[in-house]
Image: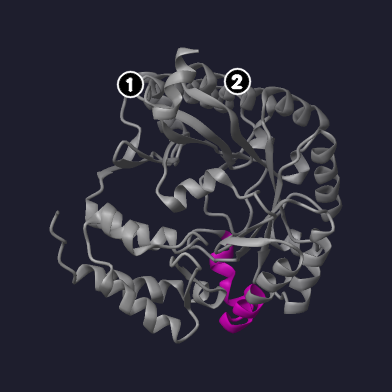
Amino acid sequence: MPILTKRPNKTPLGIYIHVPFCRSKCQYCDFYSLATKDDSLIDGFLDAVCDHIKEAGELAPGYKVDTVYFGGGTPSFFGGDGMAEILNTIRRNFDVVSDAEITFEANPDSVSDRLLRRLRAEGFNRASLGIQSDSDEMLKKLGRPHTYAQAVSAYQKIRKAGFRNVSVDLMYGLPGQSLQDWLSTLDTVLRLLPEHISCYGLKIEEGTPFWGMRDVLNLPGDDEQAEMYLSAVEALRSRGFRQYEISNFCRKGMISRHNMKYWTGGEYLGFGPSASSDFAGKRYTLKRDLQAYINGIRDGGDIMEDIQEIPLRERAGEYLMLRLRTSVGIAAQEYEKAFLLPFAPLEEVLEKHRRYYHTTQTDTGRWVLTPRGYLVSNDVITDLLLAQDQSEPMKRI
């Protein structure tokens, strides 16, 4: 009861667990992960993460955890027992609210009834399933370790286990993919009736297997990708989905509460190799090396790759970059109060882009990007940052 009475004054906090294990690496993936089921590495990771959580919990007595997200890698490949142990460690060391959103990512090939029963029993209430495509030929090109039939089966098992908040990931702009192929994929997957859909355009990152093949992949051009994106926005809108972020769509009330923390400046703590945190005014990333992470936690060594205290003007820039990714957008009074910088120079930029249908204002006066604006968001934000850099701080009243 004493904890509950203090909660209204506590700061919301998200927790992210990076699980770096996969059955195999996809051709396009540049996230930190290892294609292994080495028991010694898995046990070392589990011990390190739990010890790290215990240490961090002592530093956050003024916080209430309202979201927990297990990403990767492939958390479902790691297994339900390990995830349950980590979640219980979080609960023992942090003030976790009763209605916290607790998400796990899964690949279809590693979803089982036993895994889902364990996770539901432990309080997981949201699943994110990586489907990517309904074409087995395309899945094979991408290096995905599953078929579409396995994806459907996994989705059905997730529903049968009692999950009422299910997200699916899809990709467009794939090798040899046409607009009609993409719309057909959307139509097929929408028949599953998920609450949330993430649609990502394929990006070829240096260091991935696809990088060396990029000239022969037969990828759709920029205009074709833009058409795929805008067509998806319209198709999902017509099926009752609200676009609340550049790549994310949901049914009413089913946004990803955890991911919204990243985009709206909320605080979060990351655990596991390569995980990032934004906590108590500082931002840092953990080493992108599992063994170095394990050794650092065990021996009390340095596990951070980068730590920075973010100046207020830089935070103001992040407010513009991140909020404009979302349907929340930005507002003059909010901006000026938080950062003591004038909004008028930014409004000139926003008005200019409104003429090109890149920006618009909501009924409450907040500025947001349009779907076409999302396609040129880098240009809009660059213009805003230039205007911000040239502005002088406002005087305190």
Q: Main secondary structure of the magenta part?
A: helix
Residue nearest the viewer, comparing 372 with 302: 372
Residue 386 appears in view: no
Q: Farthest bottom residue? A: 355
What label does residue 300 carry, if any? Answer: 1
* In the image, residue 304 above or below residue 314: above
Which residues make up the magenta segment?
Answer: 209-229
The secondary structure type at the circle numbered 1 is loop
| Image location (x, y in percent) of residue 268 | 43, 38
Residue at the image point whose x is 48% and y is 62% from the top: 325
The amino acid type of the residue labelled 2 equals Glu
* In the image, residue 53 above or below residue 13: above
Tell me if 80 is positioned left or right of 64 in this view: right
* In the image, residue 108 above or below residue 98: below
Q: Residues within 10 Å of mark 2 (few under 14, many from 20)?
A: some
Tell me if 312 is positioned left or right of 207 in this view: left
Residue under pointer 2: 85
Residue at the image point whose x is 76% and y is 31% from the top: 116
| Image location (x, y in percent) of residue 105 | 65, 42
What label does residue 7 carry, if any? Answer: none
Q: Quadrant of the C terminus?
A: bottom left
The amino acid type of the residue labelled 1 equals Gly
Mark 2 vs mark 1: which is more N-terminal? Answer: 2
| Corner quadrant of residue 242 | bottom right
Whether label 2 touches label 1, CB < 8 Å: no
